[in-house]
Amino acid sequence: MDETEFWELIDGTREAADGDPEDHAELLVDRLTQADPESVLDFARHFESRYRRAYRWDLWGAAWVLLDGASDDAFDYFRCWLIGQGRDVFEGALHDPDALADLLDDFDDEIDGDGEELGYAADEAYETLTGTVAPDLGIPPAPPEPEGTAIDFENDQELARRYPKLWERFGVAGAGAGAGD
């Protein structure tokens, strides 16, 4: 499976799921189980390499604004969800995390931003196909800390400065007058 096929599979299953992350993961597992085990491992390598590329402080800050806070686990699930949004959104967010304000049509923090199940899709499919756990993918381990400079997520002024478009649309300022009153 090459990169184009990877993104076509991500896009096709997301569209069929109407953007629902849980349905997206189920459809992805179904599609992957129609492939051979080596193709599933190729998919897993593509997914994992992008998951690791997104392990960055600036993306974590964007997730923090979108989700009104993001723990370690929440950021892990956000990165899976971000991959699930497709190549344009993923690459756009890596280029400029604040651009997510323009790249996302709708965002409901109750269902969006959490793609945990997407992260397990290849493992589930591989196990279904082979009856065994997927082998090591041969990808270098993730760094212990996100790439870039740490951000003080508790500093609303800093978040508003770093992510002006996201802050206006999704942050405390975008929540609307009286939302927290």
Image (cartoon, rainbow, N blue to C red):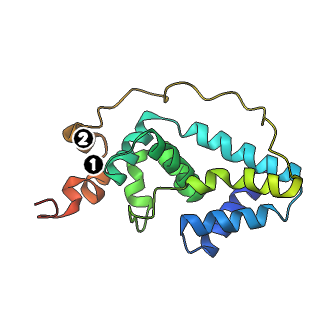
Whether residue 137 is situated above or below residue 150 in the rendered picture: below
| Label 1 CA crowd tier, 10 Å (few <14, some 14–19, many 20+) | some
- Image position, residue 51 (x, y; %): 60, 42
Seen from the viewer's position, the closer of residues 58 and 36 is 36
- Asked if the residue under mark 1 is in contact with the one under mark 2, i.e. CB atoms within 8 Å, the reply is yes
Give the SS element for disc 1. helix
Say whether residue 107 is visible.
yes
Q: Residue at x 58, y 52 (%)?
A: 83
Q: Which residue is mark 2?
A: 161
Compared across the picture, whether 154 is left or right of 121 comes to left
- Image position, residue 126 (x, y; %): 81, 52
Q: Amino acid at mark 2?
A: Arg
Seen from the viewer's position, the closer of residues 82 and 118 is 118
- Image position, residue 53 (x, y; %): 58, 37
Residue lying furthest front? 131
Compared across the picture, whether 85 is left or right of 150 comes to right
Give the quadrant of residue 161: top left
Q: Residue at x 45, y 38 (%)?
A: 72
Q: Amino acid at mark 1?
A: Pro
Whether residue 77 is situated above or below residue 103 in the rendered picture: above
Give the quadrant of residue 52: top right
